[in-house]
């Protein structure tokens, strides 16, 4: 078999996708090009010549080591054709508001709702790159709350609500016609938190923001010890945020967009213990919103699927009743 050199390669439209990935052979070929961009290399002996079996198993000509492209990935042991997985990845990455399990079941004609649900949960786990760059420059940090509507205290300290921490880059750009500068929104990070303590905030900030960055927050007391001397801290009053260039405009915008997504795509119902998966999916899509081709996000998720370890069904807990996946969510904060 001949080797190949892979450059960025992805379909630019759904029509092109359907024409290109209509059979299993082309899907496996694409996985191989993603896995071995410079050509096949045996992981056992380093040889670059191989045989390809009728079941798409790569067999090294020197040591006869065998490898399946789906083994050890989220597609491991799947009984569905790989074309189904490719279509699921396409819809998952190219639909602006995402896709829920009911939609995916209908689109693929799956007999089981739970198959569609578990596929989506696995794909959401593949949206975070371990080596992704931290946010830098001017970064707004805030928290918002998602949870069932209950009487009593609102905002921080309210019971029955899930805390979500948000960090978003802000940077200045210049209008080419007027040459005036204006603030732009950059990359975002979202994380479910147990509380708003200094420890929780520090963990989130240190994990997601480069040291020496300028961090804008409200005047919650926990932020000061969380940021210490490694960041330039600018505390602002919530009431003094008048426009898109002041205060925490970007963080508040992201909070409202996430809540709108939950209301629309997921109809305001999902279990809090799975919320981080949905937030990761949102971050993946939002940070690639300016991509020139919708197919590039598809390529990125395929790369992640190939690189990450298998996520087994037993690792994703869910109730056998489809309606019990949903948890009525109200919004505050």
Image (cartoon, helix red, strand yellow):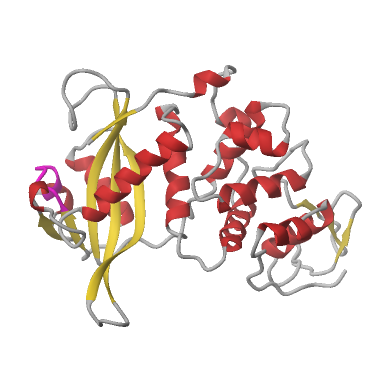
* Residue 42 part of the magenta segment: no
Seen at 49% across and 55% down, the residue is 129
Residue 158 placed where, x, y %?
20, 25
Farthest front residue? Answer: 177
- Viewer-side residue, 312 vs 269: 269
User: In which quadrant of the rendered view does residue 65 lie?
Assistant: bottom right
* Residue 219 part of the magenta segment: yes
- Range of magenta residues: 217-224
Q: Main secondary structure of the magenta part?
A: loop
Q: Is residue 145 above or below residue 249?
A: above
Question: Which of the image's four quarters has the C terminus?
Answer: top left
Residue 56 placed where, x, y %?
84, 52
Question: Which of the image's four quarters has the N terminus?
Answer: bottom right
Q: Is residue 298 above or below residue 256?
A: below
Residue 172 placed where, x, y %?
25, 72
Image side of residue 47 versus residue 112, left or right: right
Q: How many marks?
A: 0
- Viewer-side residue, 313 vs 236: 236
Question: Taking the image as drawn, is residue 43 in sight?
Answer: no
Seen at 17% across and 61% down, the residue is 231
Question: Taking the image as drawn, is residue 333 in sight?
Answer: yes
Farthest right residue? Answer: 54
Seen at 58% across and 39% down, the residue is 120
Residue 88 placed where, x, y %?
65, 45
Q: Is residue 248 above or below residue 153?
A: below
- Viewer-side residue, 132 vs 65: 132
């Amino acid at each position: 078999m001949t080797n190949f050199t892979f450059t960025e390669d992805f379909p630019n439209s759904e029509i092109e996708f359907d024409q290109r990935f209509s059979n299993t052979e082309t899907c496996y070929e694409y996985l191989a090009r993603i896995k071995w961009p410079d050509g096949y290399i045996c992981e056992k002996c380093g040889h670059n010549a191989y045989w390809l079996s009728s079941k798409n198993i790569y067999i090294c000509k020197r040591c006869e080591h065998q490898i399946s492209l789906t083994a050890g990935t989220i597609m491991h042991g799947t009984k569905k054709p790989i074309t189904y997985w490719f279509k699921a990845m396409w819809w998952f990455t190219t639909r602006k508001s995402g896709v829920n399990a009911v939609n995916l079941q209908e689109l693929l004609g799956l007999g089981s709702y739970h198959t569609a649900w578990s596929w989506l949960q696995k794909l959401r786990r593949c949206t975070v790159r371990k080596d992704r760059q931290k946010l830098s420059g001017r970064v707004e940090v805030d928290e918002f709350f998602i949870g069932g509507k209950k009487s009593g205290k609102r905002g921080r300290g309210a019971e029955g609500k899930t805390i979500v921490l948000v960090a978003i880059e802000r940077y200045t750009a210049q209008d080419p016609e007027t040459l005036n500068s204006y603030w732009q929104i950059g990359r975002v990070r979202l994380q479910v938190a147990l509380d708003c303590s200094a420890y929780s905030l520090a963990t989130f900030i240190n994990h997601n923001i480069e040291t020496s960055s300028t961090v804008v927050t409200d005047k919650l007391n926990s932020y000061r010890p969380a940021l210490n001397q490694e960041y330039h801290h600018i505390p602002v009053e919530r009431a003094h945020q008048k426009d898109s260039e002041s205060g925490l405009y970007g963080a508040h915008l992201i909070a409202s967009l996430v809540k709108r997504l939950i209301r629309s795509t997921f109809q305001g119902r999902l279990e809090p213990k799975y919320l981080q998966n949905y937030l990761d999916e949102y971050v993946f899509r939002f940070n690639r919103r300016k991509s020139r081709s919708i197919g590039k996000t598809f390529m990125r998720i395929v790369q992640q699927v190939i690189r990450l370890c298998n996520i087994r069904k037993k690792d994703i807990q869910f109730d056998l009743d489809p309606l019990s996946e949903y948890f009525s969510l109200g919004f505050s904060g």
